[in-house]
Amino acid sequence: MAEPLFRRLALIGVGLIGSSVARIARARGDLAAEVVATARSAATLARVAALGIADVVEPDPARAVAGADCVMICAPVGAYAAIGAAIAPHLAPGAIVTDVGSTKQSVIRDLGPLLPAGVHFVPAHPIAGTEFSGPDAGFAALFEGRWCLLTPLPGSDGEAVERIRELWRRCGAMVAAMEPAHHDRVLAIVSHLPHLIAFTICGTADDLADESRAEVLQFAASGFRDFTRIAGSDPTMWRDVFLNNREALLEMLARFMEDAQAMARAVRWGDGAYIEDKINRGRKIRRSLIEINQA
Amino acid sequence: MAEPLFRRLALIGVGLIGSSVARIARARGDLAAEVVATARSAATLARVAALGIADVVEPDPARAVAGADCVMICAPVGAYAAIGAAIAPHLAPGAIVTDVGSTKQSVIRDLGPLLPAGVHFVPAHPIAGTEFSGPDAGFAALFEGRWCLLTPLPGSDGEAVERIRELWRRCGAMVAAMEPAHHDRVLAIVSHLPHLIAFTICGTADDLADESRAEVLQFAASGFRDFTRIAGSDPTMWRDVFLNNREALLEMLARFMEDAQAMARAVRWGDGAYIEDKINRGRKIRRSLIEINQA
């Protein structure tokens, strides 16, 4: 077994992602010599203790980060400013602070200014998830073969970045670096907009008159089932993602709405060639996805 | 084994649905004593012959339906008028004409007036499918536990309707009857709109500048992958569905666009409560789907 990367890894938040990291640390032994878990809710802490996936379960985030050489924030991105305020005075000199949030500019904006000099900040985003949430939802293979994007800052310490890279490699992920603004744009189209649309269409169906709604559920064809699978994800996490990637998400949504209006117009006026062309472009993207093994 | 329901079953079109029915007929032996398959393309006919899933492979639809006591149209709904014109003069007296199209008002509009007196018309729609198409995509379990909706007309012959019900029961489907207009409305929200949206968002992503597009593919998160799965379906079939369920689809799309605009407004103005409410409604629908075992 390789030398543990960290002496003490503090996880702030132990939902799907945090509890998966904890399970990997437990299974491999080479992420950290000791894992401390903290969470806002007593129920989550009790479950983490019962699952036995952390060495220490600590309700106070200030005590959780004390002495930690790596602090990983695994909470909804809307909570980062409050978490930063709570932990910043207690961070050990030389500690690395990293995270797993789906938006990166907001994380840098909310957390960056609070961190004391001598603490290294390495924002990260493992692109992995399921429709389930909470400490019971995590599993050690979650990041296997998935991408983890790091968005280091211009002044980031090279060694700190390399240690976070290595942490994610040991979690089974492929690691790449990206500009924070570019990350937020790419994620807006591949993840945030699809989720916003899925949540929306579920509401649209729910608004139908009662007699139709029962049948919507009864006869839900494969199309709608795929949407509702996406729409089963954690509400707080997604609310925070939408609010914290506002500009990129609104731009992608506006582009999509223009395209949907153009489709509506083609349907109204019977422009079959236009519709077929759009469907074929979708198929082309699908084939590309299969080719690069992400399907 | 039960008595075969039909002496001669003619399948007009042998793609995913038609070739699945052919495979079931071959496996069970009690759908029809003889299965005749016809299709527009020589390549499809050659594959059907090679697969050995029909007793007779017949390029001429007029000859295919001659002597058939059941004719099942399994072609894109935009082709029904031409198919009707080709087969109507050759239908046997007392024959049942049925279909599997995803739109029912258009099918009744296009096919109904062409059928001679004494031929029974029983429109049907098995709600089953995959992202694959063509004669190789079919399989005998496709309809297992799925709904098949019949939309009989006011004057439909009761015995003919019952025989088509029994045919789909033998295919493993649950059968229900519905008004054609109501069918088209329900399907617009559960299937047609989700597909239109999926095709559209793939196009929106494809339109991004080249440097982003590569990364869209590379980092495709689970959200976008689900959309591209839907978007892998048959272009001609879906083009025809959109064009032939125009009014219901445009109404559902308009409702969805209003809802998406309201979400955009909530994101712009930071209305977290509104966003959370919409996400929670999506989760509620998801739970309902699980409860009724359609998930």
Image (spheres, coloured by chain):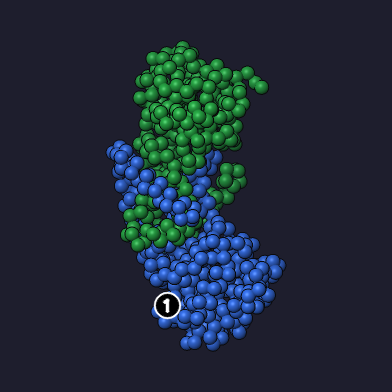
Chain colours: A blue, B green
Decide which of A2, B147 is in the foreground and name it: A2
Q: Quadrant of residue B118?
A: top left
* Residue A273 location (% of width, % of height): 30, 40
Residue beneath the point at 42% across and 39% down: B234
Q: Is residue B269 visible?
A: no
Q: Which residue is at 51% across, 65% downward?
A: A174
Instruction: Give the percent coordinates (x, y) of residue B74.
Output: 46, 29
Q: Nearer the viewer, residue B66 or B109?
A: B66
Residue at 65%, 78% (x, y): give it: A33
* Vertical relation: A87 (above or below) A206: below
Residue at image point 55% right, 16% down: B7
- Coordinates of residue B67 in the picture (x, y in percent): 48, 14
Which quadrant is the N terminus of chain A positioned in?
A: bottom right
Q: Which amino acid is tagged 1? A: Leu
State the residue position of label 1. Answer: A153
Label 1: chain?
Answer: A
Quadrant of res A254: bottom left
Vertical order, B221 against B125 (above or below): below
